Image: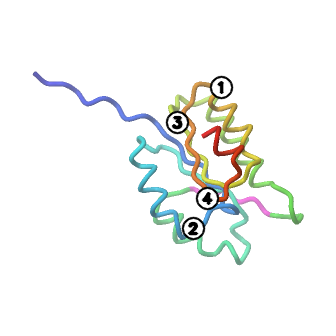
Amino acid sequence: MHCDPLPRPSAQVLVDAENTSPYHMDDIMLELSKLGSISIKRCYGDFAAPQQAPWKAVLLKHGIIPVQQYQYTTGKGSSDMALVIDAMDLLYTRNIDALAICSSDSDFTRLASRLREGSKIVYGVGRRQTPQAFKVVW
């Protein structure tokens, strides 16, 4: 008897470059690849800023699309807003099963909750000190 393998869940990865270390992306991508077929990989940040230079090699290595967000004002979250907009677009326009948010920023708590309300699996990837409010919605 021949059985076709079950299709792997469709997963998307959205990375907050300001709150994720490029030096951990090898491990992060390895773990996330176990969750399903990753069709969309995006990273949000101001890659023109000198402190973001290490991201270039990581983005190329993993085929992650950089989403450039210039930081015109200190403390404003233009990258966060772009990530949220893309996540909501994915929720409503793509047939996705799961979405991984790589960030330790608790500002994404409501986004994670909303994605779950939309019957999506949400994976959170962050540091140990990620606020508990964000951890519980993963």
In x, y percent, where is residue 114? 69, 31
Residue appearing at x 72%, y 42% in the figure: 109
Residue appearing at x 57%, y 70% in the figure: 56
Q: Identify the image quadrant of the C terminus.
A: top right
Q: Is residue 127 magenta?
A: no
Q: Quadrant of residue 35?
A: top left
Q: CA distance from mark 2 to mark 3?
A: 22 Å
- Is 46 on the left-hand or right-hand side of 125? right
Label 2: which secondary element: helix
What residue span does the magenta drawing correspond to? 65-70
Q: Hey, what amino acid is under mark 1?
A: Glu
Q: Identify the image quadrant of the N terminus.
A: top left
Mark number displayed over residue 128: 4
In x, y percent, where is residue 21? 60, 66
- Is 70 on the left-hand or right-hand side of 20? right
Mark number displayed over residue 22: 2
The mark that comes first in sequence, 1 or 4, is 1
Q: Hey, what amino acid is under mark 3?
A: Ala
Mark 1, residue position: 117
Q: CA distance from mark 1 to mark 3?
A: 12 Å
Label 3: which secondary element: strand
Residue appearing at x 64%, y 40% in the figure: 136
Q: Hey, what amino acid is under mark 4?
A: Arg
